[in-house]
Amino acid sequence: MANRFISEMGLPKSIANVFAARNVKTAKDALSLTEFELMELLDVGLAEVTSAVAYISEMVCPPFETALSLLEQRVQNEHLAGHLPTRLKGLDKALCGGIPFGVVTELVGPAGIGKTQFCLKLALLASLPTSYGGLDGQVIYIDVESKFSSRRMIEIGSKSFPEVFYREGMAKEMAGRILVLQPSSLPEFTDSLQQIKVLLLQNKLKLLIIDSMAALVSGEFEQTNNPRQHPLAWHISFIKSLAELSRIPIIVTNQVRSQTHGDSLFSFQHTVGANSQMQSRPDNPSRFDSHLIAALGIHWAHAVSIRLILEVRSGQRYLKIAKSPISPPLQFCFEITASGISLLSDDGVEVSGPQINAIHSHGHSAIIHCSDTC
Amino acid sequence: MEVMRMAISGTQRGKLISAGYTSLSSLSSVSPSLLAKDLNISEVEALEILKAASHSSRLDTSGGDHAILTGAQNAWEMLHEDSCVRITTSSADVDDILGGGISCKEVTEIGGIPGIGKTQFGIQLAINVQIPAHFGGLGGKAIYVDTEGSFMVERTLQIAEGCIEDMEKDKHFRQRDIRAVKEKLLPKDFLANIFHFRICSYTELIAMINHLDKWVSEHRDVKLVVIDSVTFYFRQDFEDMALRTRILGEMALKLMKLAKKFNLAVVLLNQAATKCAEGLYQLTLALGDSWSHASTNRIILFWKGEERCAYIDKSASLPSASAPYSITSEGIRNSITNCKRIRMM
């Protein structure tokens, strides 16, 4: 609505023509100027400018809805009240039914923890027929790191949903619904996103997975050294608006990087808490392996609505709900089996404090050695 | 050239200057008909110019009796108005440092890192502003301006239920009120009083804020405006930093005016950003230094050890202090360090 033409808004002809003559064409042009600047530019009086700006504002301002009507719409119009169940009972319960539609959900974790496994499973779930609890739709899987494996996906499918996958032709149909894109550069990725927008208008697409977002910039991050402009700034807002407009769930994975010291404190914390910080640091056993943080930085982290952290502590894999507007901070133990990711227990343990945001990869090698010997 | 500052159009200004009217005093003793003749314009237009001139000259006369200055009040008069109503945050500790809650008539900015609970504060306040007067609330309505799409109705429902539960408990302590409160409070009524505006670009945000003045005057019972978040569109796709600063400044002024005029609270949620100061990376709130002057109060949410904390970074009337809080399934509450619930479900 920001780019609506002023000439089409129904302003009085005389003033609308003045706007047109001075090349102030859209609402965006007009509202970016102050009233005084408009008076200069349009050469009309204050009263006219004020009333014109008020009128344009009213036209551009989107309509409101009460929270109640939003809730009712959601319950009525959307299958499963707007959630994609992950089939991990504990997680679904905590998230009120699964991965919500219309927002961006992020999976963060060290390499090899199972992010891709989780994505493969979700892709399958979305493509399943509604009678089996799926969304019965197409899935787009943007595979930046070339890690997608159809064989593994069908293995997960046939182990988790044997009743579907052993039926004649079903495996082919399910896998046929999952479109895999492998962009090799950021511009290519940008193109695909724009194409996806067109596809979304046809309403067939039910899930978008981007695995992984961080890989797109890790190579180019160094060159674009403009601190004001995040290299993915455009993509962040575009992906968010995609989710919102089409009301589909979007899953994005993110890598980890090591932390630069001190950038997780506010300036006043340095002065106030410096002493206590110093004292608590040395005897903190997690100091050595808690230096991992999610890549893409704080700007990106603000944009995701749900952040799930996958991590390893002393050889045990954990799934943590680190950011969610609905769920308390919970953690679950999980393992990776032939049928994909599965929770060891459906009871989540509540984590207090900022531990929920820490990412560990301590004892990761233990798992690898273990599976080698077995 | 005092005429340069007058609120008139360029043509009129040009005519004034070419006819020799450059100062306000030269306009003060001229009649509309004379001016019309001098400038070769209609008398109506001349009258408009003289009105604008007397308006500017009134602004110019500083000092003197304050009654002449329209809109001025002395500090003593303001003292009585200052005892304004506040919206509770549902955490007694945070309310304490805020002097009772988020105050009406002021712009309060709440910022912090992702996942610390900014949106939770926004939703909680949108519910709490509706607490009826006989429970010590305002009984108002709320506008929720959502730029990020982070408003969750499911969560709003949970918080509304939690708030009603608290009021039910409260009712037992106030036996005398129990007869007055016959009607049962329903979470749905709370949801029906939150007006949700989904904003998709910064132009829409400006338009929305321009339009709020009219909208609120039609809905006088609105007592809270939450903007979640003010940052989002200004952090991306914005090349022209000077334009950004100006738009933000103007927006802040309009919001302050709105808060004063309709006696409502404005809460802006802001994101955290990293800033490089003296070679050291630090967290700070986004949008830069000039924006930090825009809000009357600034609250920063952060992790202090194991607890979530709210810290008053800036306030004209409150001492800087910090208080712990926690986020439970019912909403924002006091921190519960000594009775930690280990298992949730």
Image: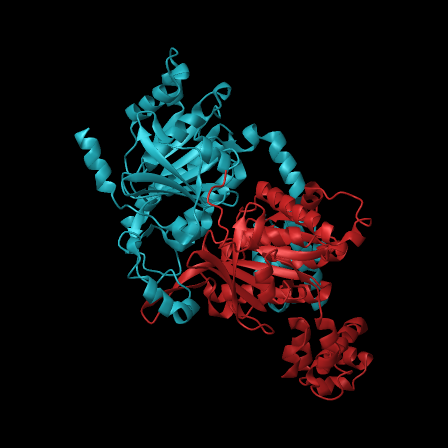
- Give the residue displayed 62% in from the left and 42% down from the top: B157
Q: Nearer the viewer, residue A168 or A45?
A: A168
Name the quarter where the C terminus of chain A is drawn.
Answer: top left
Q: Nearer the viewer, residue A239 or B109?
A: B109
Query: Is B50 above or below relative to A246?
Result: below
The chain displayed red equals: B
Residue B100: x %, y % from top left: 64, 64
Residue B5: x %, y % from top left: 64, 78
- Asked where in the image residue A215 lies, by quadrant, the reply is top left
Q: Nearer the viewer, residue B300 or A181?
A: B300
- Asked whether residue A44 is in view, the answer is no
- Asked where in the image residue A91 lies, by quadrant, the reply is top left
Residue B336: x %, y % from top left: 52, 54
Is B93 situated left or right of B343 in this image?
right
Residue A39: x %, y % from top left: 64, 67
The chain displayed cyan equals: A
Query: Is A373 above or below relative to A319?
Result: above
Is A234 situated left or right of A151 in this image?
right
- Asked whether residue B302 is in view, the answer is yes
- Give the residue displayed 46% in from the left and 30% down from the top: A89
